[in-house]
Amino acid sequence: AKRDGKNGFQYFDSITRKEVEVASTIRRDLRLALEKGQFFLCYQPLVDIRTGKVTSMEALLRWQHPKKGLISPIHFIPIAEETRQIISIGEWVLRAACRQMKEWLNMGYSGFNVSVNVSVHQLQQPDFAKVVFDILNEIELEPRYLELEITETILIEAMETVVRNLYRLKEVGVKIIIDDFGTENSSFKYLQKFTVDGLKIDRSFVSEIKVEVNKAIVDAIIFLGHRMKLGVTAEGVETKEQLDCLIESGCDKVQGYYFSKPLPPDEAIRMVQKESNY
Ligand code: C2E
Ligand code: CA
Ligand code: CA
Ligand code: CA
């Protein structure tokens, strides 16, 4: 359909239809993706704002679809959550990321840990902490090398199970970070119920940090984090200006295209070797 005024709705319609079609393809093919080995991980470094050294490697999931090509996690994670497949996919991610970290350690790299994104659906499983322990034992990776990033969206009903899992993980030294901090109104509830190790400021505040209100929010999150003795990371840093702004605000760690895009492990690890990444 054409994109003119009169056919505006038609245009919108066809986009929607396309999207629905893609979504149903995803729904259909996601079931086989795991067993067919179509998933892989890319890694994006987190950099210490003072030293310029890599402190962490965030594992980001990628799906190589045989016909549709590379599919972004923003398109298939919500579907995987809806169908509960995120439980098995998430376990695959944890194992693959821990294996990669172990391999890096075996190669002689150190001074950083691996970050894995965990869905609330995983945390709501009563045995989630045990699943993580089993993976760490199997791979012989010390828990302190693992960091979990949790998006703050939370279903209050299962809060007890979530908190119990987080507590057991933290007890052995796994670090817990709240991802996309400031985007959900449950932020403070989370902090009230559980002591995390760090906050990650959402990209939406960082990318528009030049706008006064965003700078104010960033400053407030950093103040809150430091007041609670937590490390604060800013994601989505793309420019020198944004970096300078974050340095001025006293942010601890930064991540974004300014430093590196998510890369295959062999390329991502090169940043660890560098004395500084500025
Ligand atoms: P996230 O955890 O907030 O990850 C940050 C996203 O921003 C990543 O997108 C990353 O590639 C992108 N990004 C990083 N730096 C920049 C930048 O400077 N500019 C811009 N424009 N973007 C940047 P990606 O890899 O597409 O992942 C999207 C989301 O999918 C993630 O957001 C996370 O919520 C989810 N996700 C990815 N992997 C997993 C996973 O293994 N498990 C779960 N549960 N969710 C995952
Ligand atoms: Ca994340
Ligand atoms: Ca994030
Ligand atoms: Ca985000």
Image: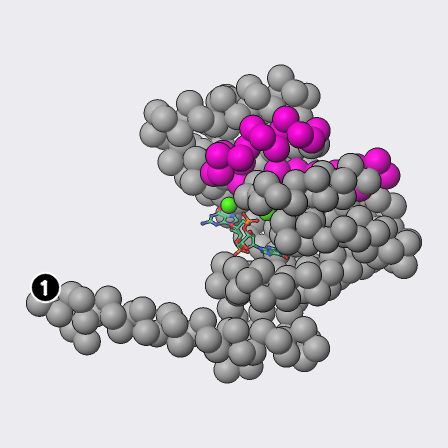
In front of the other: 230 or 190: 190
Residue range corresponding to the magenta coloring: 169-195
Q: Which residue is mark 1?
A: 5
| 85 over 156 or under it: above or below | below
Which quadrant holds the N terminus? bottom left
Q: In the current view of this chain or complex, which residue is farthest to the front?
A: 157
In front of the other: 272 or 28: 28
SS state under label 1: loop
Q: Is residue 131 left or right of residue 202?
A: right
Q: Is residue 2 visible?
A: yes
Badge 1, how many Cα within 10 Å: few under 14, some, many 20+? few
Quadrant in which residue 226 is drawn: top right
Check disc 1 and give the amino acid type: Gly
Q: In the current view of this chain or complex, which residue is farthest to the bottom?
A: 67
Residue 199, position as x, y percentages in the image: 61, 33
Seen at 25% across and 70% down, the residue is: 13
Residue 23, position as x, y percentages in the image: 45, 71
Q: Is residue 227 left or right of residue 91?
A: left
Quadrant in which residue 34 is drawn: bottom right
Seen at 48% across and 34% down, the residue is: 185
Q: Does the stretch in magenta take in 184?
A: yes
Please, which colouring scheme is shown? one colour
Residue 159, position as x, y percentages in the image: 66, 40
Report how many numbered discs are placed on residues in the image: 1
| 127 over 36 or under it: above or below | above
Q: Does the stretch in magenta take in 43?
A: no
Which quadrant holds the C terminus? top right
Judge: label 1 CB < 8 Å from ligand 1: no
Q: Is residue 132 visible?
A: no
Q: Is residue 214 left or right of residue 34?
A: left
Q: Is residue 169 left or right of residue 32?
A: right
| 131 over 164 or under it: above or below | below
